[in-house]
Amino acid sequence: MSESKTVVILGGGLGGVVAATVLRKKLPDNHRVIVVDREPDHLFAPSLLWFMAGLRTARDIVRPLSRLEKKGIEVVYGEIEAIDPEARRVRIGPGSNGSSPGETTSGGRTLDADYLIVSLGADLAPETIPGLADAGQTFYTMAGAASLHDTLENFDGGKIVVLTATPAYKCPAAPYEAAMLLNEQANKRGVGDRTQVDLYAAEPGPMGVTGPEVSAGVRQMVEGQGIGFHPEHQVTAVDPEARRISFSNGVEADFDVLAYVPPHRAPNVVRDSGLVDESGWIPVDRNTLDTRFPGVYAIGDITGILLKMGKPLPMAGVFAEGQAEVVARNIAREITGKGDPASFDGNGGCFIEVGGGKAGFGRGDFYADPTPQIKLHGVGRRWHIAKILFEKTWFRRWL
Ligand SMILES: Cc1cc2nc3c(=O)[nH]c(=O)nc-3n(C[C@H](O)[C@H](O)[C@H](O)COP(=O)(O)OP(=O)(O)OC[C@H]3O[C@@H](n4cnc5c(N)ncnc54)[C@H](O)[C@@H]3O)c2cc1C
């Protein structure tokens, strides 16, 4: 039996639970697999839009991370306060609820790793736009999606604005889907005839990395529902009293309900660790997810992978999942000497919910040279069903 190794996975989100589960399956019991997260629950964020629309309850879209313990994975609940990638050492404080449940868990301690996987995602920073957080609600968090749901329950018609505060954010389809689902909700409530939904985007078009055809296709889906689309509108401030958004091009827009995608940035603890570069994200080998520190890997939203076209690989759960499997297999191979080397190939896809139980689907090779080769499959019921299966399979496979 080989000498005991410890793999520490920072973050029990989409990338973290996959990495932990694959490693646990592949490693003999004398090796430790540890997941650290500040939250006791794992959130399946792709279902947040359904939650906002009242099609899921909170219980439907979260699972306790403690389920991993049944598989032999140790879970530490705590705030990761410092990462030393050279020493592969992390300092952990108390978790979000101040407690540290479970036998194998504790707050306020140091963990040393033979292998470190950083899967801490992107932090949301609405406070960087004056007035945004006070004026609006974001469907990018459980609390924000719940509050939007409550707002919609009492909505009697008016102006709904969906806003992207920066051009790059996780799941580039999400605000476009949100606009269509909010439109559907207004229609379902019988107030569609006195409701106008507008989408003000910081970016030039939907899902720009996927190419002009896919982008135009998604724009058509949105505009086909009578939703106003206003690209290249960079918000500078929001006035919560007047319910007015100001943009850098001098345009102003009024709203009754503001549903927004906040600016993203790497968590402070990662920015302070020396792992990020000038992009603000962790540079990695695009196939193996190695960082510049031996034995330290980064996966998911926290990574900055520049595509051949010069834009970053979009942040998406499908990529976090694929990268997690690759890193886990390669670490297991290094420890056990078994298995083939794995490589992340940049393939992935994403559903675009349009409401009415229908969705489109874009899929392809994001690493293709010179530009990603993505095909958009037209709107239909089968893609909506495929997204339901994606959610069900996620929980069955990983939690
Ligand atoms: C509304 C919405 C819809 C989406 N739809 C889709 C979709 O349809 N398809 C798709 O592929 N992707 C979708 N995504 C994107 C997807 O959810 C993310 O890309 C994915 O979650 C990234 O995984 P990750 O492991 O990198 O980060 P996350 O899943 O965000 O996990 C990061 C974890 O780190 C923890 N953490 C962070 N900092 C600390 C700290 N200092 N100490 C302790 N713990 C910490 C967090 O609590 C979290 O659990 C969507 C996202 C949103 C918001």
Image: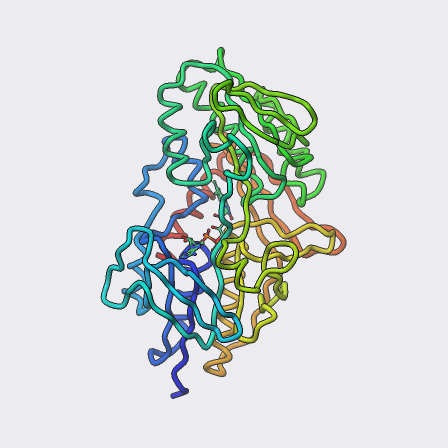
User: Where residue 141 sits: x, y (%)?
Assistant: 42, 40
Residue at position x 52%, y 52% in the image: 318
Q: Does 131 sit above or below residue 394?
A: above
Residue at position x 69%, y 55% in the image: 307
**Mark count:** 0
User: Where residue 144 sits: x, y (%)?
Assistant: 41, 35
Residue at position x 36%, y 75% in the image: 32
- Left/right placement of residue 154 relative to residue 116 reads left
- Image quarter where the N terminus lies is bottom left
Q: Quadrant of residue 28?
A: bottom left
User: Where residue 82 sits: x, y (%)?
Assistant: 45, 64
User: Where residue 178 sits: x, y (%)?
Assistant: 50, 32
- Which residue, as the protein is rendered here, is positioned at the far right? 370
- Left/right placement of residue 368 relative to residue 190 reads right
Q: Quadrant of residue 19?
A: bottom left
Q: Nearer the viewer, residue 254 or 327?
A: 254
Q: Please, which colouring scheme is shown?
A: rainbow
- Left/right placement of residue 115 relative to residue 173 reads left
Q: Does 173 sit above or below residue 84?
A: above
- Image quarter where the C terminus lies is bottom left
